[in-house]
């Protein structure tokens, strides 16, 4: 059940077939803003982990014409490489014995069949496909920061993006504890919460459970019933920042 926080807004960079943690943010959000007009940096924007018999493996979308300071929405995919087939083949091999492999492969193939202009569009399409599969999208509005007229940077821009969506609560990932000015949100009549990821375990292929793989892993292993494992809860910022910082902050 969704917590009663008032209208909750999440602003997050688009990620390629993201981990379950981002779907938990979607589940808790009334509006999810893809923060696609910020600088591209090494991370999960164009790559994601899967579990294989030989250990964790990365599926990476190749990029081209990169330049310093480019935005995620400006980042081009290198279509000279048949990376789609490579990712499908790698996933089929890794999850050959998973009970819902066909669901995951069909979801991937449907995303790959759609024309995209850049990395941001691919990553957004992959997230929306996962949200649709787990029936999370009907209660959440999806937007792109690049399609609005809100400029600036840092906390001020996040506040303005949230205000444009009439937010009562801004929900964010753990990394924001290092830079976010929480009091500025409160001065504008908005609360700030951090997500406490559920990281609920489920039967996985290839050894001990890890939550930090693509949510396609949840699709392949649990099917649509995996929706019940997409948990997480919001923690008010004062309670959250008073804790000891986790060893590995996740977005």
Image: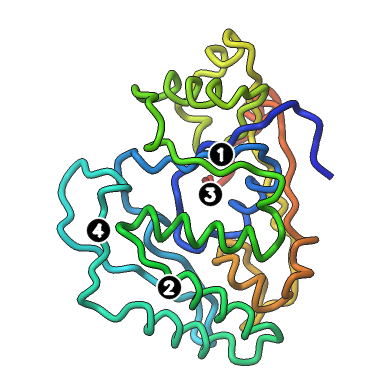
**Mark 3 = which residue?**
248
Q: Residues within 10 Å of mark 2 (few under 14, many from 20)?
A: some
Mark drawn on residue 174: 1
Of badges 3 and 1, the one in the foreground is 1
- Residue closest to the far right: 1
Q: Is residue 21 above or below residue 31?
A: below
Q: Earlier in the sequence, mark 4 or mark 2?
A: 4
Q: In the image, is 42 to the left or to the right of 189?
A: left
**Residue at the image point whose x is 71% and y is 32% from the top:** 235
The residue at the point 70 percent across, 28 percent down is: 7
Task: Report which residue position mark 4 lands on.
Answer: 76
| Residue 3 picture quarter | top right
**Comparing labels 1 and 2, the label whose residue is closer to the camera:** 2
First in sequence: mark 3 vs mark 2: 2
Decide which of tag 3 and tag 1 comes sooner along the chain.
1
Residue at (55%, 81%) from the top-left corner?
105
**Secondary structure category for the residue under label 1:** helix
**Picture quarter containing residue 186?**
top right
Task: Say which of marks 4 and 2 sits in front.
Answer: 2
Q: CA distance from mark 3 to mark 1?
A: 9 Å
Q: Mark 2 sits on what residue? A: 112
Foreground mark, 3 or 4? 4
In the image, what residue occupies the spot 37% across and 26% down? 149
Q: CA distance from mark 3 to mark 2?
A: 31 Å
Q: CA distance from mark 1 to mark 2?
A: 30 Å
């Amino acid at each position: 059940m969704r917590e009663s926080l008032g209208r909750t807004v999440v602003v997050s960079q688009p990620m390629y077939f993201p981990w379950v943690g981002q779907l938990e943010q979607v589940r808790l959000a009334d509006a999810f803003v893809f923060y696609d007009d910020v600088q591209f940096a090494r991370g999960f924007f164009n790559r994601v982990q899967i579990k294989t018999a030989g250990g964790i493996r990365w599926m990476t979308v190749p990029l081209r014409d990169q330049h310093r300071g480019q935005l995620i929405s400006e980042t081009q995919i290198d279509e000279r490489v048949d990376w789609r087939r490579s990712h499908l083949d790698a996933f089929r091999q890794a999850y050959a014995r998973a009970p819902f492999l066909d669901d995951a492969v069909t979801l991937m193939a449907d995303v790959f069949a759609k024309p995209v202009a850049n990395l941001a569009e691919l990553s957004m399409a992959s997230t929306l496909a996962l949200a649709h599969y787990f029936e999370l999208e009907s209660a959440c509005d999806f937007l792109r920061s690049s399609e609005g007229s809100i400029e600036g940077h840092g906390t001020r821009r996040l506040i303005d993006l949230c205000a444009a969506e009439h937010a009562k609560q801004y929900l964010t990932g753990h990394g924001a504890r290092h830079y976010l000015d929480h009091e500025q949100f409160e001065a504008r009549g908005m609360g700030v919460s951090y997500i406490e990821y559920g990281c609920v375990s489920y039967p996985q292929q290839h050894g001990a459970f890890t939550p930090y793989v693509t949510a396609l892993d949840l699709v392949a292993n649990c099917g649509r019933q995996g929706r019940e494992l997409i948990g997480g809860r919001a923690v008010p910022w004062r309670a959250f920042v008073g804790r000891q910082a986790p060893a590995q902050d996740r977005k």
